[in-house]
């Protein structure tokens, strides 16, 4: 990763302020199956770290929901969400598409549909199975 200039990270009243918007997809390296989909305003590396190190289930969701997560190798693909679309809407649409394989839920905006298609195309190009291996459930909330 190259950074051309300084990056400002804002801390206000003792809390780090998110500065981005990301959708990330956890891929089981051995099976090439999607194991988890999340979204965050923080750096995806930090979020991945917290997923496997935090004992708090809301923060360490991969640790809390994927059996033997610590014996499994994952690749995490992170996609920067364009400013004009909502991260939660993209995450929900992507999960719905991965679960059903039959189109986006209504009413997906053209921008959301296009971004989800971009993610699915990248997964397809990498030979990733378009099905969950078990970690994400419909009621899961977006990571902080």
Image (cartoon, grey):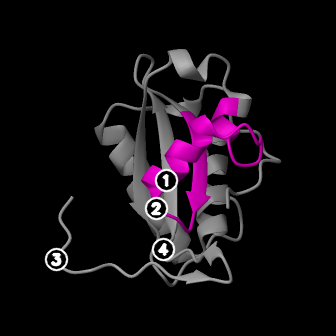
Secondary structure of the residue carrying numbered label 3: loop
Which residue occupies the foreground of this view, 63 or 35? 63
Residue 53: give x, y in percent of width and height: 60, 37
Number of residues whose C-alpha sits closer than 10 Å to that of mark 3, classed few (under 14), some (14–19) or many (20 or more): few
Q: Is residue 10 left or right of residue 135?
A: left
Mark nearer the N terminus (4 vs 3): 3
Mark nearer the N terminus (1 vs 4): 4
Q: CA distance from mark 2 to mark 1?
A: 5 Å
For label 4, the residue is 20
Contact check, label 4 and label 2, Cβ < 8 Å: yes
Q: Is residue 62 left or right of residue 27?
A: right
* Residue drawn at the location 45% of the way across and 65% of the way down: 115
Q: Is residue 72 left or right of residue 135?
A: left
For label 3, the residue is 4
Residue 128: give x, y in percent of width and height: 40, 32
Contact check, label 2 and label 1, Cβ < 8 Å: yes
Q: CA distance from mark 1 to mark 3?
A: 21 Å
* Residue drawn at the location 76% of the way across and 39% of the way down: 137
Q: Is residue 63 visible?
A: yes
Contact check, label 1 and label 4, Cβ < 8 Å: no
For label 1, the residue is 46
**Which quarter of the image is occupied by the C terminus?**
bottom right
Q: Is residue 95 above or below residue 124?
A: below
The magenta segment is 35-63
Q: Is residue 122 left or right of residue 69?
A: left
Q: CA distance from mark 1 to mark 4?
A: 12 Å
- Which dot marks residue 43? 2
Q: Is residue 82 above or below residue 67?
A: below
Q: CA distance from mark 4 to mark 2?
A: 7 Å
């Amino acid at each position: 990763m190259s950074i051309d200039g300084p990056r400002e990270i804002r801390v206000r009243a003792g809390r780090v302020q998110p500065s981005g918007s990301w959708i990330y997809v956890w891929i089981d390296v051995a099976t090439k199956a999607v194991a988890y989909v999340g979204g965050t305003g923080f750096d995806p590396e930090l979020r991945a770290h917290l997923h496997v190190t935090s004992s708090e289930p809301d923060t360490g969701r991969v640790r809390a929901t994927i059996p033997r997560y610590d014996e499994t190798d994952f690749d995490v693909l992170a996609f920067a969400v364009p400013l004009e679309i909502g991260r939660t809407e993209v995450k929900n649409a992507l999960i719905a598409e991965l679960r059903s394989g039959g189109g986006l839920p209504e009413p997906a905006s053209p921008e959301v549909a296009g971004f989800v298609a971009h993610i699915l195309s990248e997964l397809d190009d990498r030979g990733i199975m378009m099905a969950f291996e078990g970690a994400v459930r419909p009621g899961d909330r977006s990571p902080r």
